[in-house]
Image: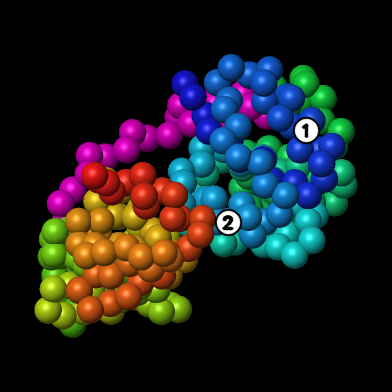
Amino acid sequence: MKINCLIVDDESMARQSLERLCTKRPELTVMHVCTNGNEALQIVESRTVDLMFLDVEMPGLTGLELLDLLPYSMPVVLTTSKTEYAFAAFQYQVIDYLKKPITLPRFNQAVDKVVDTIKAAPATPPPTNDIYVRTDGRFVRLAFDDILYVENTGDYVKIRMNSHTHVVHTTMKNLEEKLDPRRFLRVHRTFIVNLSRIIDIEENTLVIADKVIPISRANKAELMNRINIL
């Protein structure tokens, strides 16, 4: 089992300590180390993270605020020098809560919980070729091939098709989990695109139909890796 980890902490010594601890567990691979919550948010929006070691107190976006913004669920282990966040950890249903300085036995205990949680998770169902949305009291089938892109508009998302648009009351996180990850990619906080419908890409934008769609800096590398470049 390989578990891709993200370390998020504004303290250099704490980041280095966690990196060293991760090397003690062969199933852990540190994919990225972030110094703040905003940087971490960009990573999780563009890549799949299996486990996050997350500091609570950070300038700007705090660890708890980051938990509210995560686009998908993942095991999280909170790290902090204070014990007063234990109740918050319980409310957010994180896997474990580590008090700094973190010892190897306590770290191993937390990782064991993560491994047990991942093993107990239900198998991912096979991808489908469509999704159903509720419109005027009925469920309408939308084939993945016909979806051009999805745009976030607050409490709603717009699903742009070839000739019309469906407005659905849901979140980008929920819709992204329903779409086939082999065909769709979140290129920006507010846009998910059908990779097969991209007309061209220039700098930090792409074009689908008549729509110019922004590409976030954090998502650009993943996009370029996913397209077939000659």
Q: Amino acid at mark 1?
A: Gln
Q: Which residue is mark 2?
A: 41
Label 2 packing within 10 angstroms: few (<14), some (14-19), many (20+): some
- Disc 2 to disc 1, how far (Cα)? 20 Å
| Left or right relative to 68: residue 12 | right
Determine if residue 87 is in view: no
Q: Which residue is mark 1?
A: 16
Query: Magenta stretch?
Result: 110-130
Q: Secondary structure at mark 2?
A: helix
Q: Position of residue 71 (x, y in %)?
A: 48, 57
Magenta span includes 129 = yes
Q: Amino acid at mark 2?
A: Leu
Q: Residue 146 versus residue 206: which sits nearer the camera?
A: 206
| Left or right relative to 163: residue 152 | right
The residue shown at (37%, 35%) is 122
Q: Position of residue 63 (x, y in %)?
A: 70, 55
Quarter residue 30 falls in: top right
The residue shown at (61%, 47%) is 93
The residue shown at (22%, 65%) is 199
| Left or right relative to 54: residue 140 | left
Judge whether 112 appears above or below 166 on screen. Answer: above
The C terminus lies in quadrant = top left
Magenta span includes 133 = no
Q: Secondary structure at mark 1?
A: helix
Determine if residue 40 is in view: yes
Residue projecting furthest to the front:
230
The residue shown at (37%, 52%) is 223
Quarter residue 37 falls in: bottom right
Count of picture labels: 2
